[in-house]
Image: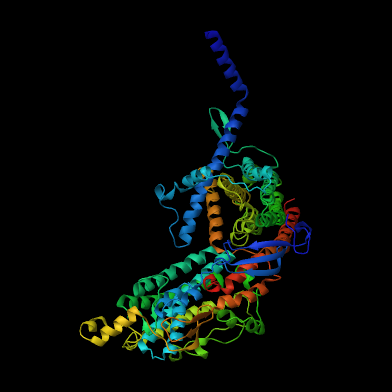
Amino acid sequence: MTEIFDMTWDFIVLFLNENVPLIVGSVKAVVIAVGVMSVVPALVWLERRLMGRFQVRLGPNRVGPFGFGQPMADTVKLLFKESIIQASADKFLFHLAPAVVVVTAIVGFAVIPFGEPFEVFGQSIELWGANVNSGILFVFAISGMGIYGMVLAGLSSNNKYSLMGGLRSSAQMISYELTLGLSALSIIVLTGSLSLIDMVQAQEAYPFILVQPLAFLLFFIAGIAETNRAPFDLPEAEQELVAGFHTEYTGMKFAMFFMGEYINMVTMSALVTILFLGGWNAYGLPVWPIVAFAGKVIFLLCVFIWLRSTFPRIRYDRLMTFGWKVLLPLCLLNLMITGTIKVIWFP
Amino acid sequence: MSVTEQGLLERDKDTMTLNMGPQHPSTHGVFRVILEMDGEVVKTAEPEIGYLHTGIEKTCENKRYVHVIPMTDRLDYLNPPGNNLAFCLSTEKLLDIEIPERAQALRVIMCELSRIASHLVWLGTHALDIGAMTVFLYCWREREMILDLNEEISGVRMMTSYIRVGGVAKDATRPWLDGIRDFIDYFPAKVDEYEKLLTRNPIWLDRTEGIGAFTREEAINWSLSGPALRASGVNWDIRKSQPYSGYDNYSFDIPTQSNGDIYDRYRVRVEEMRQSRIIIKQAMEKLPIGDYKTPDNKVSLPPRETLHTSMEALIHHFKLVSEGISVPKGETYVPIEGARGEVGFYIVSDGTNVPYRVKLRAPSFLAIPGMCKIMEGCYIADVVGIIGSIDIVMGEVDR
């Protein structure tokens, strides 16, 4: 009996020793996925409280201290809601769409580095899900996938408002992904790498916003459009399209679209932080790298919320015009200048 | 799969029929418009009304004159004193009675306060339709003050029924007058605040300038009135052209614009809020001392304390309470300038205490055909902007 036990124990130890990266990776994956998902309620709370302040009202303040329990209460409510699927909907796609949105949003966060590696029990733990050498392309690719969720939701709902919302989101995505990619390209030119980790390490001396202010602005604007946030929240334009692509969704499926949107917001803020604000570099401030990173991300999230409460919604055709005729030429110009300077002075 | 009138299947059409309303967040009540869409562009717009039909006009034929006044509150529910006043003026013209000056000034204050409140609701909801949600809550903050004032004077926040045949329901109280003084000092800075958020905001300009424009002729031909008409360059305000309730004693401007688009309607209404404040200020300064209702006891109740001493007062009191006002035979129409345009009641009296026929001229109702015409060729996002800028109230459309 003892022998069997010892053998099993030996086997476990052996297995653990040989598969440390696998175990660490799995734990990290779970931690990141759960962490990202639990950021959503906090962000919903932050948004509602901040919007309340902007709009001379209080925001949720009844459930728990400072209303912090409100998002939990809402989640519980949404979980217990009846899931209504109208008879004319395409059932498979209708179920698939919210899953696509949430899964892509979480997967996109996998390559985001949010702190310097540190040592635990002789093991170097890296604070990112995966070190992909073309990290930025991975994020763009995944967020491009996410739009399928919205388009499918719009199509499968068999509702004209939803259809228009879905169409708008795909058009918006195509227009603004270009700007997003091209403005990030100037950073790639500066660092010569597609890896997000290399980009952060390249900004140890100064953040790239100082040398690329235009690219930062363009990237941030396109980022807002990419995440479907106000003033570019056309796909869900509440006042025109009722709720756009998620009009017909109820309960947790509806909440999943929200989760997707908020996770995308966090990813986009993290991406802006990494590309332009120096990632986890604290620039002399006595804080942990991860705190510096989180601080920058939270600041950008507040800017997202601030913009939402300030601006009216832009119109669909103007959004396209703005994307193609203003942002894109500016991007190309910025890229040209960056490239020229790089080639001439820093070959 | 539905079959259209031409016998085509819906899927063979090039356009898409989009049913907007009656349950839609931005049609300002239960207004329904059937849009024929080509992508995001509206080809034709067909209004469909009647979802809020309450039969108020017909009900009025069975109610005594005094009892009609609370019904008028519910027509244009954002501007109840205006409706009260329009009905009272028509009735008083048939009765041929003079209204004391204090009552007239109180009526003007009440109407202008409610015009501001109505424009605040309009600005808030209109900005919300275009996506600027913060303005909405700022406007609500100021409207709340006006509603508190309404509560102070009439006991009711919205459906005040304050203006009665022969005068007003109650004399001004001290807290009410103080509250109005505070409000007129406080309000201009707030209007500047709304303008700061919107007037030169590029997205707001983008969404409003040149959209939903009525030329001067079109505006007249579509029978628009009020701010929508004045935005198209027609300087026509009943407070100036046919003064009532002593509006000729106040000096104020009629703001006009020339393009007639959403932006101009916005500018006109914002300026009107400022002008209304100026009128209230003047009325407060020279608020005359005197009766708050006509001393004619055939129309208004005699003072309570005289009932114990005067037989005549007791008889008048009994007759008025049990029978109501008897209005001489005849028909009349007195228009006033409501928050949305010309409001007036056409009243036919057969000499009894109940009107024979009451017909409302509702500016929102008359604006709907022109509004739907102007939607054609616009984007769907502009449809909500146009509905918001015309400022329809379904209560007076489907009465």
Where in the figure is residue B114, as x and y percent of width and height? 45, 76
Q: Looking at the picture, does residue A327 appear above or below residue B224? A: above
Where in the figure is residue B178, as x and y percent of width and height? 33, 77
Does residue B188 show up?
Answer: no
Extreme-left residue of the structure: B309
Q: Nearer the viewer, residue B63 or A240?
A: B63
Question: Splitting the image into 4 quarters, where does residue B175 fall?
Answer: bottom left
Task: State the residue at coordinates (28%, 84%).
Answer: B315
Q: Looking at the picture, does residue A188 appear above or below residue B396? A: above
Task: State the residue at coordinates (57%, 12%).
Answer: A7
Q: Looking at the picture, does residue B141 appear above or below residue B239? A: above
Q: Nearer the viewer, residue B390 or B142?
A: B390
Task: State the residue at coordinates (64%, 65%).
Answer: B381
Question: Splitting the image into 4 quarters, where does residue A253 fall?
Answer: top right
- Give the left or right position of residue A192, taking residue A236 as reference: right
Q: How many marks?
A: 0
Does residue A241 show up?
Answer: yes
Where in the figure is residue A270, as x and y percent of width and height? 59, 48
Question: Splitting the image into 4 quarters, where does residue B203 fall?
Answer: bottom right
Where in the figure is residue B190, as x and y percent of width and height? 46, 72
Q: Nearer the viewer, residue B258 or A291?
A: B258
Q: Nearer the viewer, residue A7 or B57?
A: B57
Quadrant in which the N terminus of chain B is drawn: bottom right
Colour scheme shown: rainbow
